[in-house]
Image (cartoon, rainbow, N blue to C red):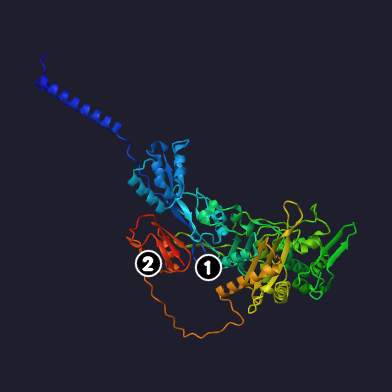
Amino acid sequence: MEMNGFYSKGRIITFAVIIGVMIFAILISYGMLMLKPAPQVIPSVVTRERGSILDRNGKILAIQTTVYNLSVTPSAVKNVDNMAAVLSPIIGISAEKIADQIKNASKDFIYLKKRINQAEHDEIQNAVQSYELYGLRMEKTVSRNYPENSLAAQLIGFMGDDGEGLSGIELQCQKILAPPEDITKVNTYGNNVLLTIDSNLQFKLEQIAGAAMEDTQAESMMLIAAEAKTGEILSYISLPAPNLNYYRSSSDEERMDRPAMYAYEPGSVFKIFSVASFLDAGVITPDETFLCDGVFEIKTSNGEHIRMTCLEHHGLLTARGALQYSCNDALAQMSQKINSEYFLQQLRDFGFGSKTGIELPGETKGSVKKTTDKLWSARSKPTISIGQEISVSALQMVQAATAIANGGKPVQLTVVSKIADKNGKILYQHQPVEKDQVISKKTADYILSCMETTAVAGTGSRANIGDVAIGVKTGTAQMLDSEKGGYSDTDFLSNCVAVFPVEDPEIILYIVITKAKGETYAGRIVAPVINQAANAIIDYLGLQRNNAVSLRHSGKIEIPTEKPLVIEKVVPDFTGYPKRMLTSLLDRKDLNIIIKGDGWVVSQNPPPGTPVREDMVIELTLE
């Protein structure tokens, strides 16, 4: 059969060649694709921003910042000694230690240093290029910066490397500051927590507390100042305290949140709550007298012998006199008149033996005995009445004092003023929470007047202010000897509570000094500190003094104009700028602003004119 002319031999060969070339080209293309590295997938930028912690006025106390973890792959390092010598002055680790870490690494990945700041990051980056260093890697991660260092440290708390709070508000408000990641959202923003403390007042009172601790050579110290009517804590001090920016190197003593966690016997300060219980129960009257001959001694029907001494022979005393001179004998006699179960319940109603419920982790309940306890004896009730055989926390003492300041009604303590989202919208605003009536208003007012007498002409006279009526009660308690058992002959806890102004209480101030050297009586070492702290609070808050001078003012106020502070392409000269004009810079997400101190800028790093880079660290020192 003859082939059609269209399917000629030449055409068939040509078509076969074209098909062959196409197949070869396809194979080559597939081969090249197989050998070519897979394209790098660029992940979308995900923001996980932890909320800030601020004081009641909006001053930043804790804020998210960027740091870097420096790691090395030992097998990729060409010259270990050279790398160690270059990195040493930048990261602050000896060249010998760096070289040893790299040479003796058990795996091909080790961290040389974590939490490197932006300035160190930039220096390392320049060194890598200048000295051709191989094997180094810097991982960008978020961290926490605490601009005020040790201010209110235990209250603020600390965040760990994993983004979880480890203590204080950072722990207690973890879900508020950093809510769980939502897979339906690219970005997650935490809320901001505004504390009740005033950082400026906190700073003033920390200076007073620090000086007192140094003067008495004490082991530790606590100071709490709270608004009597709202329960909001204005100052929260526990010394010694850690620098939160170097928290990992701090001691357990520095980290301990004493006002919340430490339970102790308060001694004679507790007498105001005992006498309030006796009066409210009707077992004693304000006019009833008790004879103090220097010792309280009784024998019970079952053969128990109780003997308690007093510091003085006070003679006949009313309840007012018993508090004024802190008489153990008179208090013990009063305690014999009240039913034990009723007395203990009254103390529990004040809040002793249970947590206050403040927004802090690890709070102690303290302890209030039961009559069914094995250690309960005929001695227990008179001993509890003078502040022994009972353990309390500083927070419990302050909250119980709010009952005396508020006509018999305690107020819930708080350290959280507001919660706001990243745009400033208020999600929570604290409102005062009154608890159930504990004692009558008549009893509360009487106890407060007794405390005023104690300040004017009693054991708390060194706390007396003069032009503002203040009520106080001091107490000095022997501390338990943890090694030998029983009470120590050398270790004492000295404390004092104050309420002022007496006519309309606004502030409750409570100070505790533990294990002072030399003088230990609270009336001599704590009462003067109450005086200093109370005066500082009165002046700062502008409370009325009886001898305050009235000034006339024209009513005309001139507001000075100040040049607004802007950071653009280069770092400006910050010298002379006040702190209030710098706080707006902390909102910049592309820069890390670190402010040290208070007042006006006296120095800065980097210097003016330095080109601005993303995530640049700018340190400002104020005086």
Which residue is at a point 79% across and 74% down the rendered structure image?
Answer: 286
Q: Secondary structure at mark 1?
A: helix
Q: Position of residue 124 (x, y in %)?
A: 38, 48
Q: Residue furthest top?
A: 1
Toward which corner of the image does residue 332 lie, by quadrant?
bottom right
Number of numbered discs overlaid on the protein picture: 2
Task: Using the rendered image of the protein, determine whether residue 538 is visible from the camera's viewpoint.
Answer: yes
Q: Position of residue 539 (x, y in %)?
A: 57, 75
Question: Could you tell me how far apart the alpha carbons at marks 1 and 2 are, in whole angstroms?
Answer: 23 Å
Which image quarter holds the N terminus?
A: top left
Q: Secondary structure at mark 2?
A: loop
Query: Label 2: few (<14), some or many (≥20) within 10 Å?
Result: some
* In the rendered image, the vertical position of residue 607 relative to residue 162, given as above or below: below
Q: Position of residue 574 (x, y in %)?
A: 39, 66
Does residue 22 appear left or right of residue 541 in this picture?
left
Q: Compare residues 455 and 16 and report the one nearer the observer.
A: 455
Q: Position of residue 356 (x, y in %)?
A: 65, 60
Task: Using the rendered image of the protein, determine whether residue 409 is visible from the camera's viewpoint.
Answer: no
* Amino acid type, label 1: Asn
Residue marked by disc 2: 565
Query: Label 1: few (<14), some or many (≥20) within 10 Å?
Result: some
Does residue 501 appear left or right of residue 169 in this picture?
right
* Amino acid type, label 2: Leu
Q: Mark 1 near mark 2, Cβ–Cβ under 8 Å? A: no
Mark closer to the chain start, 1 or 2: 1
* In the rendered image, the vertical position of residue 10 relative to residue 109, given as above or below: above
User: Residue 200's mark?
Assistant: 1
